[in-house]
């Protein structure tokens, strides 16, 4: 029987900065994901229920929202932070698996490449609503 | 690497907490990983769906109308539950990092579970018109 890692052990395995940034990004994501889910799922719910609006999410609705600088900032921050948090979390899990842990540097580089590539792809997708 | 394979595979077993005498700490940890991996999977699907906007507004709307049918609204509730648990347990972990309430970890785990169920229930209640619309 073994215990989940203590805070000290996590820092030792992941490295201080990945450990610290996982907490900072997680904390920020509580608010960003909260706003994101509220805006996409609940703010327009009344209009859909009353029949004033066909669906909660359609191209024109997203386009109007992304015409505001605040939502451009929120969506791009969300994309970057959620990719960092998600892939850093995967790294934490993989570091406990021998074959990945033995090639930690290569794995970390691979995850960064995947993250940056996905950010560019996601940003390109978002720009369809903005430009 | 300062850690060998043996010390790195620490989570093979179910672990009993010395303060509460329960396995809630292990379950909290396990559910954090389960929801985390599920949310990463969802994230890539989510980005793929949004990228259909590049094929034009009509393509995006066609896909999004399907994804707002009752079946997917119900799936969204599972997504909300996963996000809520992951966020609430994340706050629980942050408290422990600050040295707060470590001995009350089991109680905090049950508070996370309760809040996840209650808030998902409220979200589900307000989503009922979307699930049962004709």
Image (tube, grey):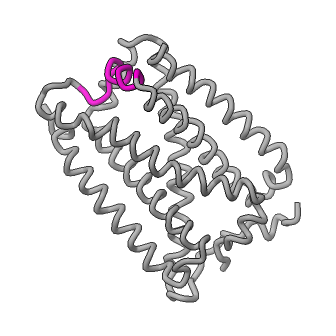
Q: Residue furthest right?
A: B1
Which residue occupies 52% across, 21% down?
A125
Q: Position of residue A94 (x, y in %)?
A: 71, 53
Q: Is residue B51 above or below residue A91?
A: above
Which residue occupies 81% across, 53% down?
A99
Quarter of the image for residue A87 reads top right
Quarter of the image for residue B12 reads bottom right
Q: Quadrant of the N terminus of chain A?
A: bottom right
Answer whether residue B62 is visible to the viewer in this image: no
Which residue occupies 57% across, 83% down?
B16
**Of the pair B128 and B107, the residue shown nearer to us:** B107
Point out the stretch of residues depicted in magenta.
A55-67
Residue A65 in magenta stretch: yes
**Of the pair B76 and A13, the residue shown nearer to us:** A13
Q: Is residue A11 above or below residue B23?
A: above
The total of numbered circles placed on residues is: 0
Residue A58 in magenta stretch: yes
Q: Position of residue A123 (x, y in %)?
A: 57, 25
């Amino acid at each position: 029987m073994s215990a989940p890692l203590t805070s000290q052990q996590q820092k030792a395995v992941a490295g201080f900065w990945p450990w610290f940034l996982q907490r900072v990004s997680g904390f920020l994501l509580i608010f960003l994901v909260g706003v994101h889910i509220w805006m996409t799922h609940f703010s327009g719910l009344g209009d859909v229920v009353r029949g004033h609006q066909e669906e909660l999410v359609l191209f024109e609705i997203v386009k109007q929202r992304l015409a505001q600088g605040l939502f451009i900032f929120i969506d791009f921050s969300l994309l970057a932070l959620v990719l960092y948090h998600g892939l850093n979390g995967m790294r934490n899990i993989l570091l406990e698996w021998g074959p990945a842990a033995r090639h930690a540097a290569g794995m970390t580089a691979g995850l960064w490449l995947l993250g940056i590539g996905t950010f560019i792809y996601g940003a390109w997708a978002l720009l369809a609503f903005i430009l | 690497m300062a850690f060998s394979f043996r010390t790195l595979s620490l989570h093979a077993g179910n672990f009993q907490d010395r303060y509460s005498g329960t396995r809630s700490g292990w379950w909290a940890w396990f559910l954090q990983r389960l929801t985390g991996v599920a949310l990463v999977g969802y994230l890539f699907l989510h980005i793929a769906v949004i990228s259909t906007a590049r094929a034009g507004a009509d393509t995006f709307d066609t896909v999004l109308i399907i994804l707002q049918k009752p079946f997917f609204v119900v799936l969204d509730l599972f997504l909300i539950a996963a996000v809520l648990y992951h966020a609430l347990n994340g706050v629980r972990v942050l408290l422990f990092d600050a040295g707060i309430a470590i001995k009350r970890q089991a109680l905090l785990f049950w508070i996370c579970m309760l809040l996840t169920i209650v808030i998902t229930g409220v979200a589900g209640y307000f989503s009922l018109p979307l699930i049962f619309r004709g």
